[in-house]
Amino acid sequence: MQRALATEHAAVWALQLATAFLAAEPAGQLAEAATTHRARRDTVDRLLRERGAVPVAPEAAYATPAPVTDQVSALHLLVTVETDVAAGWRSLIERTDDAAVRALAADALVDAAVRATRWRRTAGITPPTVPLPGAP
Amino acid sequence: MTAPPRHTRRQVLAGSLGAAATLAVGACTTPPAPPPPDPLGPVLAAAQADAALAEAVAAAHPPLTAAALGLAADRRAHAEAIRAEMLRATPSRPPPSSPAAAGQAAVAPPDRTAAGAALVTATRAAQAQAGGLVTALQRHRAGLVAAVAACCASHLAVLG
């Protein structure tokens, strides 16, 4: 669950960074994505506290795989972020027998896969889907 | 210090008679009952059927070709991953490598709108089918069906 939280922290940070580089239309999707990621982050944070764990804190900044200088590089960063988020949630599904946690993680995995596909389409990346999101 | 349990001759006799009876029952029930069907079986069949449908739609309706071929490729990958997992779980019972209704080729609806709608309906059903198993299976299988559901959801975003 800590890994899922860490990827959500990174997603919230990356979305903020990408805002500066996106045109109006993808920026609307960005706002929706940011709201969802913040909500997921808060849910995992609460679940961890309820279980007596100390949730991992966000980093001050994250290394991006490539410099973010324009809309295309910003979209590539968003695809990377959603790919990491998907991996975090899938890994959680494979580490818990708690049905509620699995259901939450499965919903989050769906969201991450759908958003990654939207960013790939906006960036013109083909194919826009991957067969098994969250696979290592 | 406790005394070792003592058995009377009658108890010992009764015990061995019981064991003999069990052996006799065991001998009567060969061959053993087949294991219960793998819950991934229907997920495999749907992936194979969806891939065939998507390929038929791609061939019949050029405006849908890109989206349909993408769907077909991913559903084929799902079928392969699920088949591999079923085979790992029960090596003695290899799952079918082609749909049960082999010989009955998938037919694309002649109308383009209907063909697109057929893909959406199939993909939505596939997402629900795989997603519905996430809380019911062992951990690694749960991860697999969750990924299948997520992939289907991303295709729905493409199909619109």
Image (cartoon, rainbow, N blue to C red):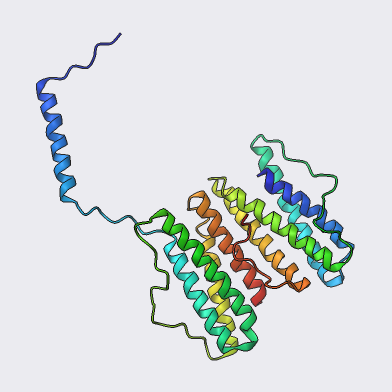
Q: Is residue B11 left or right of residue B72?
A: left
Where is residue A111 shown, x and y percent of the image? Answer: 67, 61
Q: Residue furthest bottom?
A: B110
| Location of residue A88 with respect to A21 vertically, above or below | above
Residue at 81 percent across and 69 percent down: it is A26
Quarter of the rendering occupied by the C terminus of chain B: bottom right
Camera-side residue: B143 or B94?
A: B94
Q: Is residue B4 left or right of residue B77?
A: left
Q: Is residue B103 left or right of residue A87?
A: left
Residue at 88 percent across and 65 percent down: it is A21
Q: Residue furthest top?
A: B1
Camera-side residue: B121 or B52?
A: B52
Q: Quadrant of residue A84?
A: bottom right
Where is residue A7 shown, x and y percent of the image? Answer: 73, 50
Q: How many marks?
A: 0
| Location of residue A70 with respect to B33 vertically, above or below | below
